[in-house]
Image (tube, rainbow, N blue to C red):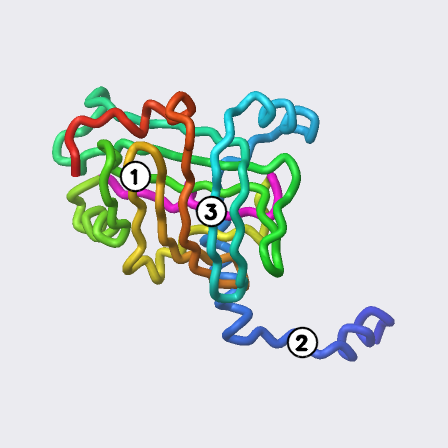
């Protein structure tokens, strides 16, 4: 028997538990849902954030992380409005989106973790109102509207996202919601990282009317 064979025989095979498999399955799912964090160096990131207006994030976290914070952070709002171009007859209607992301130049302490980037989205956004995410998920499952992923809901300790990043947890989405009045966004969301589960509730708000994003005010109909 060679030295390698002797060594291999002396090392017991790794034992993979059900908990290990669950963690690996969750990690695989989160990788698929990972948002497109910008590929930029730290200098570019800081310069980008310094050009943004700010919003106030008020956040309460419970579960595997317990924390409350209120902080002013650079904020970016983007909007996606699909058109009928390229739409295939018989397929579910595409959704419009409003995505709000706050990002700290430096990390914000948040209990046993920290926050650098936080993003919340409103699928099927048409203006001020209450958006029930569990209902929107059921409509997507019934092919009434286009399927939507959870990649624009995240709480990340780092600017780039890794295994410590929390995403909207589809497994316990019942009761999750997002709402906007035009001057602020409120939310209550279940979120999960590879090994932790939390529930976050809070608001993102703009005190100065001139800083409120027009995308929050425009609407085709009120809900």
Q: Position of residue 42 (x, y in %)?
A: 69, 31
User: Of callouts 3 and 1, which one flags the residue occurring earlier in the amino acid sequence?
Assistant: 3
For the residue carrying disc 3, how many other residues have a C-alpha within 10 Å: few (<14), some (14-19), or many (20+)? some
Between 183 and 200, the one lying in front of the other is: 183
In this figure, which residue is indicated by the disc labeled 2?
A: 13
The residue tagged 1 is 180
Of all residues, the one furthest to the left in this rendering is 90
Q: Regarding mark 1 in the picture, which secondary structure is present there?
A: strand
Quadrant assignment, res 89? top left
Residue 41 highlighted magenta (yes or no): no
| SS class, disc 3 | strand
In what element is the residue under mark 2? Answer: loop
Q: In the figure, is residue 81 to the left or right of 25?
A: left
Residue 157's place in the image compared with 17, above or below, is above
Q: Position of residue 213 (x, y in %)?
A: 37, 25
Relative side of 115 to 154, left or right = right
Specify the segment rendered in magenta: 146-159
**Which residue appears at 75% of the width and 76% of the height?**
11
40, 201: nearer the viewer: 201
Furthest-right residue in view? 3
Q: CA distance from mark 3 to mark 2?
A: 48 Å
Q: Mark 3 highlights which residue?
A: 58
* 157 in magenta: yes
Q: In this rendering, would 218 be left or right of 209?
A: left
Residue 136: x %, y % from top left: 23, 47
Q: Tell whether label 2 touches label 3 (CB within 8 Å).
A: no
């Amino acid at each position: 028997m060679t030295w390698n064979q002797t060594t291999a025989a002396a090392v017991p095979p790794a034992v993979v538990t059900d908990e290990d498999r669950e963690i690996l399955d969750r990690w695989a799912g989160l990788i698929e849902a990972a948002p497109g964090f910008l590929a930029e160096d730290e200098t570019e990131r800081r310069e980008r954030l310094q050009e943004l207006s700010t919003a106030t994030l008020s956040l309460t976290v419970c579960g595997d992380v317990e924390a409350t914070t209120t902080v002013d952070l650079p904020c970016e709002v983007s909007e996606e409005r699909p058109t009928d171009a390229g739409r295939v007859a018989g397929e579910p209607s595409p959704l419009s989106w409003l995505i709000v992301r706050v990002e700290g130049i430096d990390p914000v302490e948040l209990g046993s973790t920290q926050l650098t980037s936080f993003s919340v989205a409103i699928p099927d956004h048409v203006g001020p109102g209450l958006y029930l995410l569990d209902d929107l998920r059921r409509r997507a499952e019934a092919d009434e509207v286009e399927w939507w992923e959870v990649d624009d809901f995240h709480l990340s300790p780092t600017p780039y996202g890794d295994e410590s990043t929390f995403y909207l947890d589809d497994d316990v989405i019942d009761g999750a919601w997002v709402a906007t009045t035009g001057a602020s966004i409120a939310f209550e969301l279940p979120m999960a990282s590879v090994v932790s589960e939390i529930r976050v509730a809070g608001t993102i708000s703009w005190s100065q009317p001139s800083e409120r994003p027009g995308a929050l005010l425009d609407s085709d109909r009120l809900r």
